[in-house]
Amino acid sequence: METFYLKRLLLIVPILSVFSCADLDPLEYQVEKPLSIEQQEELDQLEPLKEYIGESSLKLGAGVSISSYNSQGTVFSLSNSNFQELTAGYGMKHGAVVNDNGELNLDEVSQFVNHAKEAGLSIYGHTLAWHSNQNATFLNSTIAPTILPAQSNPEWETILSIDFESDDQSGYQSNGPNAALAFTSDGAGFNGEGRALTITNAEVRPNEWDSQLFVTFPEATEVGQVFRLEMDIKSDVDTSINTQAHTAPGSYKHYDFFGTLTANPTWKHISIDVTINENTSGCNTIAFNLGTTAATYQFDNIEVSKYNENGNGPDWEDILDQPFETDAQNGYQSNGPNAVLSFTAMGEGAEDSGRALEITNAEVRPNEWESQLFVTFPKVTEVGQKFKLEMDVRADAVAAINTQAQTAPGAYKHYNFFGTINATTQWKHINTEVTINESTAGCNTIAFNLGLTATTYYFDNLKVSWFNEEAGQDIIIEMSEEEKKDTLSFHLDKWISGIMEVSKSNTFAWDVVNEPMDDGNPYELKSGIGKSEMAADEFYWQDYLGKDYAVEAFNLAAKYGNADDILFINDYNLEYNIDKCKGIIAYVNYIEEQGARVDGIGTQMHINIDSDRSKIIEMFKLLAATGKQIKISELDIGIGVQTKDATEELYLAQADMYHFVISEYFKLIPQNQQYGITIWSPTDSPSNSSWRAGEPIGLWTESFTRKLAYKGVVEALQSKETN
């Protein structure tokens, strides 16, 4: 019911110094006179409306479009000439000011406030807390659930693949003539298929890196990622090839990337996985050092892959993967000199590959936990979750290793985490699953008790995983009701403080809470709960903040406005539905019982010439009895037909109804409670308006010609002293 559309008027009238039809130049502008010439001329001789207020403190206001007023054209002149107070039809509402990111765009409001102030008019702030004309998109976004997107299956992603079947050297190069590049003949590649890359290092170099092959992939490494190098290789003599980590070809960072490769005159398939640490992070180039041996090397089917840990559907997710191939002690430590850490030689790890962690417990301890290995993973356990421990283990003597659950290395919680692990003198693969209970919840460390046996233990390929049952589907995390309330209270505060701060220099009265009461249950608040269709700009603060949303709004208005601002609650159909009038009065009493201040009640009064006059009188009496300031906040009166079908008889009835409403207001509302009257639509409504489209509801025609309704208002204003 609120949105106002003066901005849609065709403003083709020149700006007037004083607004009446007598001031229009007939040579420049032809007016439409629905009445006789004599009647029209009589209307034109009347003074501007505000001249009939006299010394009264009554505020005579108009509803205007901010953009039309700010353009300082016809609407600007009409408003300044006839009114003392302006109400923005839309421009000071939440939906007009708050952007989709929650920021407040207050430039137009600031201009409006300043232009009115310069013209000697004040602003009636409209409106702070309402369910309509809100930026509902933003408000709903602030309380929307958090959605964690579904993950995909853990898999290796190939980021570089070179088969050397073309002369395109993308992804590889040598460091110069010491590593001469060529290709085998077709059919001399791996498995007698295709061709391979050949690199000749003609002599032993002073430094192994004096002859190098660079292989570059398109993605720099990051700590914790797992990368895989696969390729087929041979050389015409037995040789070894160390690999360096480079940040670009020739930009050395670390001496060891994928370890040391061996080659001989027979094709050999290489597959090496490494976990990136600080030494190898930020690199995208493998440098193969070829200078140790005078040889011709052949490379084929080079692939570099990265492990993607995300999951598609319930699956195990690795949270710790430690192959012990570098000296970085990520995720493990001992409890001191009773458990001495070192590493095996290369090739002595599980399956005679790589190296393993070596821990020596020199003697049997009084307590098994006096010699411990701690393995820590980055996810704390929760009741009901499943965790898996995988590793390869052996010892120089048969030994039993009990596992404890700890909340941090050395912070014991429970004696049994993954049970007892039995080690023998042969490598043994362990794969143990446990379901977390109260005893093992809140833990992120496995303590391996090594003190029962005096021996050296060997650990390799240690991996901890947890079973993610929600992988593969979006995880939706809803806000609690209290979280929603807190969030919206914050944004209500931000909105009210922002709009009031920029307006307070010339705004001394506010429509704080607008249209709170339900039409069907007039003693209850409106609600969006259960509505099958909601307008795009509908948002019911009360559905989240509760009945006290108005208490909160009035307290915020009192906090951020001027100390003597007059704070109103406002609603429509109070003259049509007397129970609704009683309902809003009861709600005002409730708000004040909660400690907030309500200074006035606004009645909108979008009525017709046949509205029930007895109910209008009853409404004014009920409002007067509250002792509050009473404002007719949005008065306009329809005649039951479109402008094109209007007759003089209907216009006379309209003028009489305007006269009646305003006269009864003066008669029934005590003078010290008479805040004022706002004419909501000073001109008739255009046919393309969304507010009472095509209805002749105003005091002026669309062409800004005074109507009989203008005279009805003038005579009612003149009656105020008598009343």
Image (cartoon, rainbow, N blue to C red):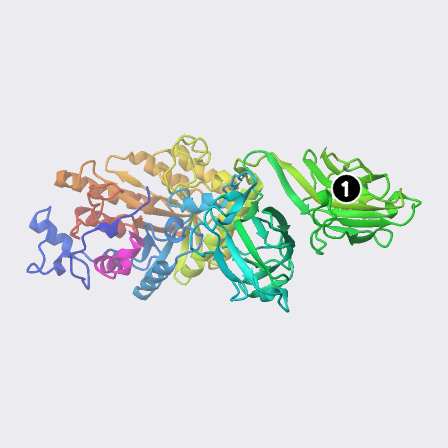
- Give the image location of residue 172, x and y in percent: 50, 57
**What residue appears at the point 45 percent right and 60 percent down from the top-left corner?**
501
In this view, the residue in front, 587 or 93, is: 93
| Farthest right residue in view | 366
Image quadrant assignment for residue 432: top right
Is 680 within the magenta? no
**What residue appears at the point 78 percent right and 48 percent down from the top-left corner?**
374
In this view, the residue in front, 475 or 395, is: 395
Is 61 within the magenta? yes
| Farthest bottom residue in view | 206
Image quadrant assignment for residue 406: top right
Image-based side of 321 in relation to 46, left or right: right
Q: Can you say whether 483 is above or below 15 in the image?
A: above
Q: Can you say whether 331 is above or below 397 in the image?
A: below
| Farthest left residue in view | 27
In this view, the residue in front, 548 or 305, is: 305
Q: Can you say whether 435 is above or below 348 in the image?
A: above
- Observer able to see residue 435: no
- Give the image location of residue 50, x and y in percent: 27, 57
Give the number of marks. 1
* Amino acid under disc 1: Val
Residue receiving disc 1: 393
Image quadrant assignment for residue 118: bottom left
User: Which residues fall within the magenta stretch?
Assistant: 60-82
Where disc 1 sits, the SS reads strand
In this view, the residue in front, 573 or 535, is: 535
Image-based side of 76 in relation to 459, left or right: left
- Observer able to see residue 245: yes
**What residue appears at the point 89 percent right and 45 percent down from the top-left corner?**
454
Query: How many C-alpha atoms fall within 10 Å of the one at disc 1: few (<14), some, or many (≥20)?
Result: many
Q: Main secondary structure of the magenta part?
A: helix
